[in-house]
Image (spheres, rainbow, N blue to C red):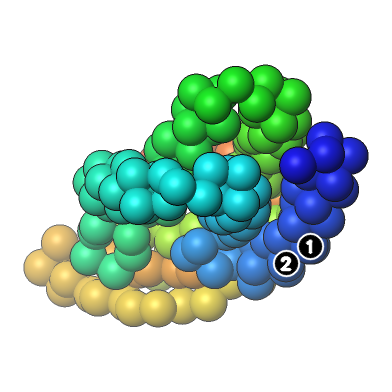
Amino acid sequence: MDFKIVLLRLTIIFVLSFIFGIERQKSHKPVGFGTFIFVAIGSCALAIIAMDLQGAISLLGAIVTGIGFLGAGALIKTTDKIFGFTTAASIWLFAILGLVIGIGDYKTGGVIYIFIWICIFIDKQFEEGKLVMYQKKLELKIHPINRDKELINLFEKYRIKKYKLISKKTDKKEKSVTINYLITGWGDDIRNLMNDLENIPCFMEFSLE
């Protein structure tokens, strides 16, 4: 296949998945920006390979399916979330990249590799909360009980745009309260909030997920 056509197809699918991935990232969905781009580019590249190697489609399918099981092993499940979708998708995409290089299509492989690094760079900015606000679960143990209002003041101080109380448990014997908030804010603001929590004695224990 002509390289210009290959480049056009990969660029189109990169742009389309890029736009959709950003929307998912802004909506704080578990499957975010990088996963959609990796899967879309990988599928496009696999279709291009299949058209050039019609006699080896069964072999390509076997390789990609096998690598898919390996990628599934990269998923990490917690009590309420699953992590590792981007890592799993990257394993699958690199298997396809290996196929592209293996058949000697170095130009296509180079384009895919460049798109991968563009995606990784932008995804890193998302993780650090520099491009869009990100959402975290904050669990906090406060002593004494009546000091929990100070946390709301800190949210306002560090421009935490949204904070939703998920649960609140009071221990009258210890005179403490354990609360869970779902907070949304810029990466630097959330990091500054965590630093402030460390320096205030009434906030005994806290974790951020």
165 over 12 or under it: above or below: below
Considering depth in this image, is 48 or 146 the residue closer to the camera?
48
Q: Residue at x 54, y 26 (%)?
A: 103
Q: Residue at x 49, y 38 (%)?
A: 96
Q: Is residue 152 visible?
A: no
Q: Residue at x 51, y 50 (%)?
A: 54
Callout 2 crowding tier (Cα within 10 Å): few <14, some 14–19, many ≥20: some
Look at the numbered discs 2 and 1 and tell me whether their residues touch, using CB distance below 8 Å: yes
- Real-space Cα separation, disc 2 to disc 1, in angstroms: 6 Å
Residue 143, image x and y in percent? 31, 57
Q: Residue at x 59, y 66 (%)?
A: 28
What numbered label is drawn on residue 20? 2
Taking 21 as reference, is 7 left or right?
Answer: right
**Mark 2 or mark 1: which is in front?**
1
Residue 93, image x and y in percent? 50, 41
What numbered label is drawn on residue 16? 1
Considering depth in this image, is 66 or 105 the residue closer to the camera?
105
Q: Residue furthest left?
A: 173
Report the amino acid beneath label 2: Phe
Q: Secondary structure at mark 1?
A: helix
What numbered label is drawn on residue 137? none
Taking 199 as reference, is 11 left or right?
Answer: right
Toward which corner of the image does residue 52 lie, by quadrant? top right
Q: Residue furthest front?
A: 55
Q: Is residue 172 visible?
A: yes
Q: Secondary structure at mark 2?
A: helix
Residue 44, image x and y in percent? 64, 53
Report the amino acid beneath label 1: Leu
